Image (spheres, grey):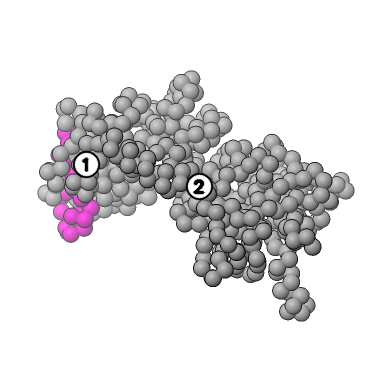
């Protein structure tokens, strides 16, 4: 095949899965983002039309780039013309996403040879300069006791050779999409789920492991996580709540209908459910309502080496790993008498065998659960703290408010969807109110 023919193939036919992740450049060569997905319009007659790309730009914002603005698609680069519309992309009911919605969809061969799954989608440009779905890369599957089993046979077929591509509402596998999300941070996975249709978001969430789903739910908006948890089988939902940070679990349970909330609390592990119920008893904009009941807590007889072993735990958020709370036994909240804190930076300057009771910071005054978020915020800002201890009237440690909890509270409820200017104004209002 000649070099000219190869170049023509690259610019007149592309595969959706391979296009994902490709950087997008403006006319002067500056990178503006990367391709996340392709927007399709499904038609009852004729091939589905590809109308544009979803492009992730700065701050994980996803915007729409119409194909009419794309001047070139080459290996490793998409070149656009004009300016990027920075309004956040929101999928319409009439639209399907090539990667998020179509890949892994179960289809049937019209010749009666059985079912298959869509592994990739070929897009070709017509003489009228429209991009359409020209072929599907299909992997044959066979029914099994666990659903469907891949046979290993793959075919590149024309649009008219299969049926089921326009069918919506049926359960759908998410293996390919999950593979693309595997190495992303929970916040990035949450952004990806938020951009899906409600049904597809539920399907993908249901196929995440419990611990991974718990991390993602902590990053989603209230509406999205209520939708997901409500769609889960009750025992599975309770298991996921067990994996969440108690304060995030309490926030989520409080958003559920009372009957559903009671059911899930009864199914949770007793200790986890007790923490959630206790947190739900505090007012929303107070230290008690914001705190987590699971900071790092050690006795004064613990050594620096023990402290360092605890802060290395993967399940401890970075904001809580920077400070360790020291109390008398018991060490589960509510603890024995609160004694003080040890800052990680101070511990790193001490020999491993040093008792942490000898390097306590006792100047950090704890707050009571009734204290307002404004007071907690000013305390953190004044002393450059990542977490503040919360104690009861008897001086027992109840938990800790971390800086990320405060930031979440200061942000508007819809900050994940709002424009930056709108978010900035909302933060200013919340801060002034606090």
Start-end of magenta stretch: 331-356
Circle 1 — which element?
helix
Q: Residue furthest front?
A: 82
- Horizontal and vertical percent for residue 396? 19, 31
Where is the C terminus found, in terms of image quarters?
Answer: top left
Q: Which mark is residue 191?
A: 2
Q: Is residue 162 above or below residue 282?
A: below
Task: Write the residue at 16% across / 58% down.
Answer: 350
Task: Write the residue at 32% across / 42% down.
Answer: 428
- Horizontal and vertical percent for residue 46? 81, 49
Q: Is residue 287 above or below residue 106?
A: above
Task: Write the residue at 29% across / 39% down.
Answer: 431
Distance from disc 1 to disc 2, alpha carbons, whole Å, reads 30 Å
Task: Write the residue at 70% across / 63% down.
Answer: 14
In front of the other: 26 or 353: 26
Q: Determine if the magenta segment contains residue 154.
A: no
Instruction: Count numbered badges in the picture.
Output: 2
Q: Residue furthest bottom?
A: 2
Q: Are marks 1 and 2 in contact (CB under 8 Å)?
A: no
- Residue 275 in sight from this viewpoint: yes
Q: Which mark is residue 84?
A: none
Q: Is residue 116 left or right of residue 178?
A: right
Q: Is residue 384 left or right of residue 276?
A: left
Where is the N terminus found, in terms of image quarters?
Answer: bottom right
- Residue 243 in sight from this viewpoint: no
Name the residue tied to disc 1. 378
Q: Quadrant of residue 55?
A: bottom right
- Horizontal and vertical percent for residue 277? 36, 26
Lower sequence index among marks 1 and 2:
2
């Amino acid at each position: 095949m000649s070099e000219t023919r190869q170049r023509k193939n690259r610019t007149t036919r592309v595969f959706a899965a391979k296009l994902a992740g490709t950087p997008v450049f403006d006319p002067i060569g500056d990178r503006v983002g990367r391709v996340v997905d392709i927007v399709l319009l499904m038609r009852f007659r004729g091939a589905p039309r590809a109308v544009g790309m979803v492009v992730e730009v700065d701050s994980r914002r996803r915007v729409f780039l119409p194909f009419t603005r794309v001047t070139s698609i080459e290996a490793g680069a998409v070149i656009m013309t004009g300016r990027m519309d920075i309004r956040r992309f929101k999928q319409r009911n009439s639209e399907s996403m090539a990667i998020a919605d179509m890949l892994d969809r179960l289809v049937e061969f019209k010749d009666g040879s059985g079912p298959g799954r869509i592994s990739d989608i070929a897009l070709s440009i017509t003489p009228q300069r429209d991009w359409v779905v020209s072929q599907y890369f299909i992997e044959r599957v066979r029914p099994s006791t666990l659903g469907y089993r891949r046979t290993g046979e793959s075919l590149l077929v024309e649009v008219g050779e299969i049926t089921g591509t326009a069918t919506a509402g049926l359960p759908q596998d998410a293996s390919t999409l999950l593979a693309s999300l595997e190495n992303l941070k929970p916040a990035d996975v949450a952004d990806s789920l938020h951009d899906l249709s409600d049904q597809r978001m539920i399907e993908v969430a249901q196929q995440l492991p419990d611990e991974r789903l718990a991390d993602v739910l902590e990053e989603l908006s209230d509406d999205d996580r209520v939708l997901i948890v409500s769609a889960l089988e009750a025992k599975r939902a309770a298991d996921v709540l067990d994996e969440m940070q108690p304060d995030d679990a309490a926030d989520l349970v409080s958003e559920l209908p009372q009957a559903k909330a009671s059911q899930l609390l009864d199914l949770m592990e007793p200790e986890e459910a007790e923490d959630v119920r206790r947190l739900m008893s505090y007012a929303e904009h107070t230290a008690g309502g914001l705190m987590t009941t699971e900071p790092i807590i050690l006795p004064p007889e613990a050594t620096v080496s023990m402290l360092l072993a605890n802060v290395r735990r993967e399940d401890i958020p970075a904001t809580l790993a920077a400070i360790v709370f020291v109390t008398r036994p018991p060490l589960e909240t509510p603890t024995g008498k609160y004694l003080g804190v040890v800052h990680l930076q101070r511990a790193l300057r001490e020999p491993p065998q040093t008792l942490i009771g000898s390097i306590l910071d006792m100047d950090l005054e704890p707050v009571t659960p009734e204290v307002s978020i404004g007071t907690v915020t000013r305390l953190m800002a004044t002393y450059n703290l990542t977490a503040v201890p919360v104690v009861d009237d008897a001086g027992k440690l109840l938990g800790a408010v971390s800086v990320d909890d405060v930031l979440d509270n200061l942000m508007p409820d819809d900050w994940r969807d709002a424009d930056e200017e709108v978010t900035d104004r909302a933060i200013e209002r919340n801060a002034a109110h606090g």
